[in-house]
Structure formats: C-alpha cells, structure tokens
Amino acid sequence: MATFLYRVGRLAFRRRWYVALVWAAVLAAVGLGALKAPGAVDEEFSMPGIESQKAFDLMEQRFPGATADGATARVVFIAPGGEKVTAAGNKQAIEKAMAGLGDGTQVASAVDPFQAKTISKDGSTAFATVTYKVGSKDLTDASRTHLERAVDQARDAGLTVETGGSALGDDAGPGGMAEVIGVAIAAVVLLIAFGSLAAAGLPLLTAVIGVGVSMATILALSSALGLSTTTGTLAMMLGLAVGIDYALFVVSRYREERAKGRVPQEAAALAVGTAGSAVVFAGLTVVIALAGLAVVGIPMLTKMGLAAAGAVVVAVLIALTLVPAFLGFWPNAVLTRRARRSGRIEGSGENNAGTRWARFVLRRPLPVLLLGVVGLGALALPAADLQLGMPGDEAKPTSTTERRAYDALAEGFGPGFNGPLTIVVDGKGTADPKSAADSVAKDIGSTEGVVSVSPARFNDAGDTAVFSVVPSTAPTDEKTKNLVTSIRDERPGIESRTGASYEVTGSTALNIDIAAKVQSALIPYLIVVVGLAIVLLLVVFRSVLVPLKAALGFLLSVLASLGAVVVVFQQGHGAGILGVEQTGPIMSLMPIFLVGIVFGLAMDYEVFLVSRMREAYVHGEPPAQAITSGFRHSARVVVAAALIMIAVFAGFIGESDSMIKMIGFGLASAVLFDAFVVRMAIVPAVLALLGHKAWWLPKWLDRILPRVDVEGEALSRRPETDPAPAAAPDPEPART
C-alpha cells in the first residue's frame, strides 16, 4: 500500500498539470450535468415494515388521490380578551378573511370554521384549514403573499391570528451561514497551527473542490437515482470536514519530510505514501459507517449515507492526487514564513506541546485513564433516560407564528388536538362494513386517554373507513405513546367481534413507530459497523487490542455525547444558553446520525494518531518512546483537525431550527469528547499500561492477515535520495 501510494504521489507531483486538468475536467463535466439534469425530486418519507406506513399505503390504495401531498395552512383565530369568536364583529371579520383565503388561484378548499364547527368550547378560539392544489414546494410566492394578506386583514379587525402548516414553507436547513462560519474558523485554526497562508489555504481549496465535485454529481444523478433535495446535506457537511482533514494530514507530513532534508518531489511522494495510507484506511472506516446506514431500513437514510460515502471517497482521491499536484506548483509556499525567508526548514522539535503532553500521560497513565473513563461515564448516564420522537411546531421558538398557533390550539382544544391519531378500518370481506367501522370507532372511543372520535369517512367502494382520534395528551407526551400501544393491543378482541381489521397511523403514531424502529435497529447497526471497522483496524495495526480499545473508546464518547444532548434538549439544563425554548424528546434519527458520523470521524483520529505510534514502534522504538514520537508528529495536526470539525458542527447550534441545533450540538460534543478525551488521553494511557502487549498478534492470525504496510516500512528501505539542505527563498515550482 505505502509503495503504491508513494508512486501515486510522485507521479501526481511530476505530472501536476495533467492531474489539475483532469480534476478541472471532472468538475466541469459533473457541473454541466448538474445544470442540465431535471430538478431534484421531493421524496416522500417512508419506512417499510411499520404499522403507520402500512396504513398510509392502504389509504393510498383505497382512497386514490385523497392522500395527495397538497400543501395545507391552518389558520387560528383568537378573540380579544374576554370576547368570543362568535360575537358579531369577530364573526364578520373571520368570514371576510375566509372569503379572501378561498379565492386564491392555487387554493383547493377553505372551509369556514362556523360551518365546520371548529370552535373551542369556551368560544375564544376557532380554526380553519386551507388546502392547496399543489405541494408546498410548488406553492408560488403570490399564494403565500395572498395568505399573509388575508391574515393581516383579520388582525387589523382586532383578532389575534396565527398560522401553521406546510404552506408556510419549511426551513430547508441551514442557509449556508453555518458552513461559512465553519470554514472561516477552520482557516484561522490552520493559519495558527501552520504559520502559512498557503498551508492553511491548500486544504480549504482542495476540500471545496471535492465538495463541488460531490454535490454536482449528486445533483446530476438526482433524477435518475431518485435522490431528494435533502440527500446532499450530509454529503456536503462531511465532505467539507474530512476533505480539510485529509489534505491537512498530507500537507503536514510533506512539511515534516521537507524538514528532514528531502527534495520537494521526494517529500510529496513520501507524504502520500505514509500519511496517504492512513488517509485511505481512515476514509474506509467512514465509508463503512455511512454505508452501514442501510441496516436501519429507511430508504432516505440509506441514500443519504451512500451519497455521503461517495463524498468521502472523492475527498480521499483529492488528498492522494490533487494535493501533491498543488504541492508541485508551490513546493515552498506551504512552509513557514521563517523557512521561506531564511532558507532553513525546521522540524517539529523534540519537545513540542505534543511531546510534553505524552510524557505527562506516560508518567501517570492510570489516573489519566480513570479520570477520562469516569468523566465520560458520568456524562453518559443521562443517556439511559433517552426518549426518542420527532419534535414539531412545539419545539420552534415562540417568536414564530407556527409555535404560537400550536400553543393556541392546545389551549383552546386540548393538548392532544395538535397530534390526532388516524384510524384506517379495512371492512373488506365483512357483511356490513359501515356497521363494523362504527363498532371499531365506539370501542376505541371508550379507551382511556381518548377525548373524541370524529365521524368515519368511507371510500367510494364503501369497504374502508378513516376517522380521527384526539388524545388527551400532547403528541410528544409519554402517555400518548401508551395510548397508541393500548389501541393496538385492543385490536385482536375488536377484530374478532367486528370482523374488520384496523391500523393506527397519523403523524403522532408515525413518530412513535419511527422511534421504535430506530431503537431496534441501533444494536444491529453498531454490530455491523463496529465489527467491520475492527477487522479493518486489525489489518492496519496488526494488533488485537488496539482495534478493541478504539471501538470501546468510541462507544464511550458517543454515549457521553448522547447524555449531553439529553441533559440540554430533553431535561433542559443549560437550554437557555443555546437558545432552546422548548425541551422534549430527542429526534428519532439522532442516535443513528451520531453513531454513523462520529464513528467515522473517531476512527480518523485513531488511524492518524496511532499509525504514527505504530510506525515508530515498527522502526525499533520502545513502546513508551513510540507513544511520544506519535504525539510529537501528530498531536498538533489531530488537535487542529478536531477543532475544525468542532467549528463546522458548532456553527449549526446558532440555527433557529431545534433539530439542526440538536444535531450540531451532538456532533460537536462527540468530536470534543472523542478527540480530546479518548484519543488524546485515554488512548496513550491504555497503550502505556499495555506496553509491548498493545501490539500483540497471534502468529496464526499474523500469517492470515494481508500486509498493507500503512506505517511505510517498505519506504524506509528505499535508497536515500539527495537531500535538499535548504528551502529555496523564492518559492518557484520545483523542477523534476
């Protein structure tokens, strides 16, 4: 592996113009394809195998066209203090507003609340639902402006009016500011760490090129492969983060080889042969983690994982080819200013901060290990109370009209009104489907925790009915989950009496089912991903204990980050500092996202840090000295890479959307714990305690495992090339 990559790096340096032109052609080709490709589809969220999805599928089959994804707007009218919406003036204002709401060109229906009898018992609140002919994506600005104008007219009449629903348009995630902040902080970190604008700018430049290639490819293939508009979100975030990191490790090793007196071409080849080997295997661990998302069984999540894995592969290829090509164009520009001016290239030093920290850990490995494990273990304890769900409008800031509409409906109609359950009754095959549906509705209506049951609506064939059930508790309340379980547990008895079967669905039931499926898929996902990664690390480090230690450390950091998320977003401690206005269940997909993304990144740090220790150990250094050598060469780079990751993820904490805020906080916390506690403290402490045993491998296993030479042992046996005693003061491109 090291020898092959050495040749790749040498060829890319020598043929830098060809390499640059090839990547420019690739970027232009996929960019042109993205421009000509049809627009990305809005993929409907589906999760095969759960009851809610089966009910939706049955509704689409028996009620053709009725479940079309038309946008909706729920308009809530609240009378002034002490008045009722039925008062003459208020009623007139509402009817006038409804007349305006109903005459929009894209409006399918707008039912007056007085006709629909959607008025609260105390008469203070009423609501109307406006249904559109098209989905929210196809809703024009004119239609949204029309909605706002009608609402403003009712407000001018003295009513308080709030709106919710998909017609208002969902926030499509971060508006780009998070990425800009992350890149800016990354540039500052790189500049401080390496003292050169070129050394800081080159990883950023190549990472942006890699993300450009990946995102253009995703857009070009979106229509053919059925990729949604959200598929590329994870690919962009991870592609940017690992792209910076991988280029950073190659550039750092190049500077190190130049400090040893290598000529630029040889230094670039050695950098790709050694650091590039670590990049390849680190990238493979990320790809394994992302491709493993297919285990969960959510089509959208599988596509997101595969798209992000493709972005990581592009980042690896960029680091192995385009980075050494750019080093060929500007061989001295990435060196420090002092080195360029004086013509002398200085090494990293025998007593840098990484060396001093390693020696500190080596002097007291057991206390460091215990402190790290106990600290992360304490942070992980709240994860035992993890409650999964899908926060809705109740989690939005009170400054939004969606949140105020949610609160007004909960106050006027009860907390369960915002999350009704939908019951689909299949009476096909029964003698009297309508009577059977009425019996089912009556039995469910008598269940404890049910406030009301709506009249059943039948399909044209008269063999299928749909009705709504309003719980007494909020959608995210644990009692609502228990109610859904009770209704489903009653099914065998009800079906035996009526002869009709039924399914429970709706947004609330769907969220409950998603949470249950994610929880059941988490353990198999961990087994697959961690198992494959242990095998890969076994090949890389030729050790039994190092991969096991890496996996256990990762689990500790992930549990600690989950615990931190629970403390802030579920229990509310420190929520105000992060701008979290409403606590509640943790997003259902959060554990899967956290495990998948952080596992890949954690293995990045593991490979980059421990591979230098392995390299020193293979070259004859004793275990303690190998740990020190690894930290001397890699600590600064790993710290810089971790800070960049934290900056990229922490930028999302400033977003108003609670789910994006939660993802950013969780990922930033996980990288913080894993990089600075696990990899920088627990790993050297464990290796120090194990000594030579850390690198133990049974002889029979040693014979079976392929030799990949990630530490570059074969390169150390190559004949020495003529050294370059000094850096050329004028950073002209090196001649080959």
Image (cartoon, rainbow, N blue to C red):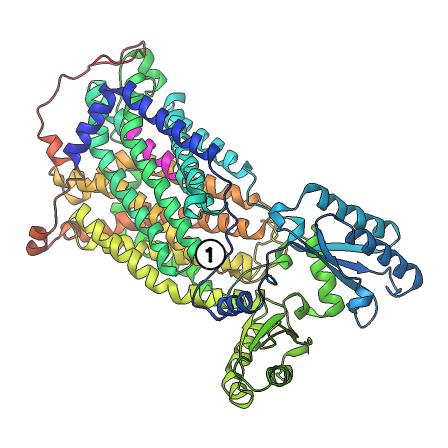
- Occupied quadrant, residue 460: bottom right
Seen from the viewer's position, the closer of residues 368 and 690 is 690
Q: SS for tag 1? A: helix
**Residue sitting at 24 percent across and 21 percent down?**
13
Q: Is 550 or 133 nearer to us in this picture? A: 133
Q: Position of residue 56 (x, y in %)?
A: 53, 66
Q: Position of residue 604 (x, y in %)?
A: 31, 43
One can see residue 364 in this view:
no
User: In the picture provided, is 267 more to the left or to the right than 555?
Assistant: left
Which residue position is annotated with label 1?
590
Direction front: furthest residue:
461
Could you tell whether 286 is left or right of 237 in the image? left
The image shows residue 427 at horizontal and vertical percentages of 55, 80
Give me the residue at 44% from left, 33% from top: 186
- Residue neighbourhood size for the residue with mark 1, other residues' Cα within 10 Å, grouped as few (<14), some (14–19), many (≥20): many
The overriding secondary structure of the stretch rendered in magenta is helix
Q: Which residues are magenta?
A: 241-251
At 46% from the left edge and 40% from the top edge, which residue is drawn? 648
Is residue 422 shown in magenta?
no
Which quadrant holds the C terminus? Answer: top left
Q: Position of residue 462 (x, y in %)?
A: 61, 76
* Amino acid beneath label 1: Met
Q: How many marks?
A: 1
Q: Is residue 286 above or below residue 58?
A: above
Residue 405: image quadrant is bottom right
- Using the rendered image of the protein, determine whether residue 515 is visible from the camera's viewpoint: yes
- Is residue 233 found left or right of 675 in the rendered image? right
Indicate the quadrant where residue 17 lies.
Answer: top left
**Residue placed most toward the observer, 683 or 166:** 166
Left or right: where 22 falls relative to 124: left
Please say if 385 is above or below 93: below
